[in-house]
Amino acid sequence: MNRRDFIVKTSLATAAATLLSRRLGAQDASKGVSLVMEAADPDMGALPVQWAADRLRETLGLAGFAVRNCARLMEAPEEDPCIVIAGTGSRLSREAGVVAPEHGDALAIGMGIIGSRNVLVASGGGIRGLVYALMELCEAVADNPQAALQPADTLSETPVNTIRSVMRCFSSDVEDKGWYHDRDFWDRYLTLLVSQRFNRFNLSFGLGYDAPNGLRDTYLYFAYPFLLSVPGYDVKAVGLDDKERDRNFATLRYISDQAAQRGLEFQLGLWTHAYEWTNSPHANYTISGLTPQTQAAYSRDALAIILKECPGITGVTFRIHGESGVPEGSYDLWKTIFSAVGSAGRPLRLDMHAKGMTPQMIDVAAATHQPFSISPKFWAEHLGLPYHQADIRPTEIPKQAKGRGPYADSEGARSFLRYGYGDLFAVGRKYNVLFRIWPGTQKVLLSGDAAFGAGYGRAMNFCGAEGCEIFEPLSFKGREGSGLPGGRLGYADPSLNPAGGDFEKYLVTYRYWGRLLYNPKTSPEGWRRQFRRDYGPAAEPAEVLLRHASRILPLITTAHLPSASNNSYWPEVYTNMAIAAEEPARPYPDTPAPRGFNTVSPLDPQLFSTIAHHAEALLDGNVDGKYSPVEVAQFLEDLSHSTFVHLEETTKAAKDPAAPAFRRLAVDTKVQAGIGRFFGQKLRAGVLFALFRQTGDPQAKAEALRLYRSAREAWAGIIADTRGVYRSDLSYGDAPWKRGSWADRLPAIDADLAAMEAAAAPANMSVHPDTLSGLIGQVTGKPQRPAAKVSGEQPAVFRRGQAIPLAFACDPAPARVTLHYRHITHAERWKSVPMTQDGAAWKGEIPAAYSDSLYALQYYFEPADASGAAWLHPGLGTALATQPYYVLLQQKA
């Protein structure tokens, strides 16, 4: 749109809003609102549009308006405010000048003039975009009817991510049967998703365990026999009543129908195809009637019936590596099962979990002739900062497989796909890439931050990826047979449970994720409505409070990762890892030996430093530009301090601090602030104790003890804050580190403190005490990165096989600059070259031979001043939400 058209359109919208404002001010709202759905518009007959229009009528009625339904604009009484629902290519939306962008999920809402009539137009680029527009109007009317019917500005949005999906898992027969069969829950929950601009919902079965070993709760684990009887096979879930089985299937059909009614894609997740359990004498259900010879054909036929009887299912997700219970390399079996998707008679999205993915498996999926995606994990099984990790940990670098066991690929030559995107981003790939966020970092605490949410929204179309699927809050609750009665939220105080169900605690979280995955630049009004509803006059400080608290745990995950597995590392309810003693393999088997707090790798080892490495660099006087544990500690302490300050401000502004919504917010933000303070102090203590181990300096040990005791006080504060609020067992699995509460973790902290106190100094000191005193001051002080004003722009594309010249300049000028670059594949390691000074700029290049590959490129700069102090550009930014490297895409020929 040119400037003249924009001015004309804005003027028309303003004039129309003024006319409608006068009309609303001059009449009683109960006189009516006309809703125009032109009979000639084909989109008006779509079931999702009819459903959304009914929601708008209902909302207007609750706001006091009598709704008149009109098939043509001329039928609307002149005295009525008029809402025109305009589908794809509507003449009315074009005449009014409120036309949604050309994308099926795009929307536009604004005032216009048709003839001499001012109207409010809700327009969609497609059926789902129109649903979004109508649901946005519903929210606006419920929040402020008069403002909703006379918006001063036109809202026009287009999604940046093709897929914006939420996954809900059935993990526990104790905790999940209730919501699974609760149809009122599904009506409200699916309405929430589409209202917040998600476009897909994934209901997943078979994730209750990582492998079919040591099972107790197997309800819907191998899902087919819990849903239906397949003609020609005598396969049963032993102990399951036929009526319950049939009820399970009827519920699945209902859920998929309700998703379709709202315009949501429905993805069925089938994560397990094992039918025999090993070492499982206490399993509540077993499977009878299957053999290795019939397993594939039965699964194919069962899936075919499900897809036929549930037309609302639009795709199927499979786990295809060894944890599925099927040995890796079983291509014929998967070819048989996938044929049910290929012959379903309608387009279906096939989605394969990325771990263990091989070219042969990709060919099996391609043979279905259906669209298919591969879904790698974003930040392993956790949630890190809002960018893609620059590198994987050494633990995930491929190793030579020993034979052809069930995990030969995922633990061998393809191990770089265990916890990242691996080599999936080759140019010319025949599959789509969809990221999936696993539930490791935060399982129960409330979170939400616009800056991080926008960063995640931008990151999910990385190198042409389709978007993102998130495990929703409370995912894996009651997993591995750990389900407990009394509610999934784990509150000891039942008054804290939301009246509408557990998901209602996280309404603002869904809003941040859905709207910012849709459009990272979306209006904040979408989540601020929820803050106003929940916190009234404290809404504004509550938003700031949650913002600061929500950055703490993703930062910890990025900088300090004892285990990439969500089954081992749970930073919310952290099982302490010792600083002063070597740890056993459990619960952190993937920390390098000698296993301990100081040897833990960052999840992004390219940009963050370990404690051990940083301590050595301090002693050597050779600290690089990576983010150090001391800097991370400062970030955490600052975020924690800000959280406590804003909690006090929010409490003062609150109308009723005893209200359940406010109490939930207060305790969860206090816990996150306490965790930040704990890890901040412990990271500093770890560096100091590493200095003591190498030098024997008693001051380093004394300071390490002081800071560790301070960390313990922070943890004790969490215990005090959560006592009587949360139950003593928050159960996300059967092992001690996957359940219990904060109080259970304190004895290990005390034991580590005692070991630190008893630790003896090495025989010889290797550093002069005055030197070490200065280093101790650096560790306990406030680190400051060099600051410089960077000038110039970076290229966005390159030609394959040609050298790529790059330049860097900043003020003040650095003494040296290093260029770091790599193909966008986790199968390779980064390369570094010094840049050369050319006047005010530093210049370097990525060689032509290196650019001649199937991959795009990423790079960043590491400048250093004359003192040796180094930093990174572009870096994480003050909000920790900037992508810390540049991406170069291949220019199309």
Image (cartoon, rainbow, N blue to C red):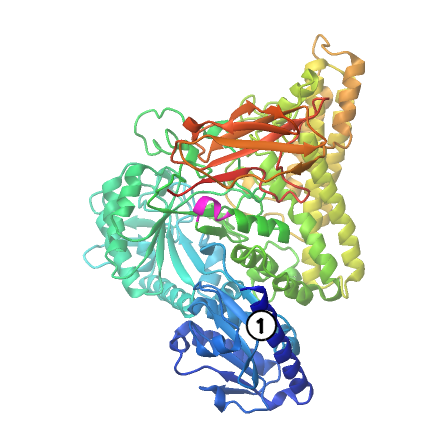
Considering depth in this image, is 6 or 205 the residue closer to the camera?
A: 6
Please tell me whether residue 464 belongs to the stretch shown in magenta. yes
Q: Quadrant of residue 650?
A: bottom right
Residue under label 1, please give it.
9
Q: Quadrant of residue 562?
A: top right
Q: Magenta stretch?
A: 460-465
Q: Amino acid at mark 1?
A: Lys
| Near-viewer residue (380 or 740) | 380
Considering every residue shown, the one lying at the far top of the view is 764
> Looking at the picture, how far across and down is residue 334, in whole percent?
27, 45
Residue 467 can be seen, yes or no: yes
Q: Nearer the viewer, residue 890 or 151?
A: 890
Residue 614's place in the image compared with 235, above or below, is above
| In the image, residue 468 lies in the stretch drawn in magenta | no
> Who's the residue at 27% across and 63% down the image?
308
- The image quadrant where one finds the C terminus is top left
Q: Residue at x 41, y 77 (%)?
A: 44
Q: Position of residue 750 (x, y in %)?
A: 70, 31
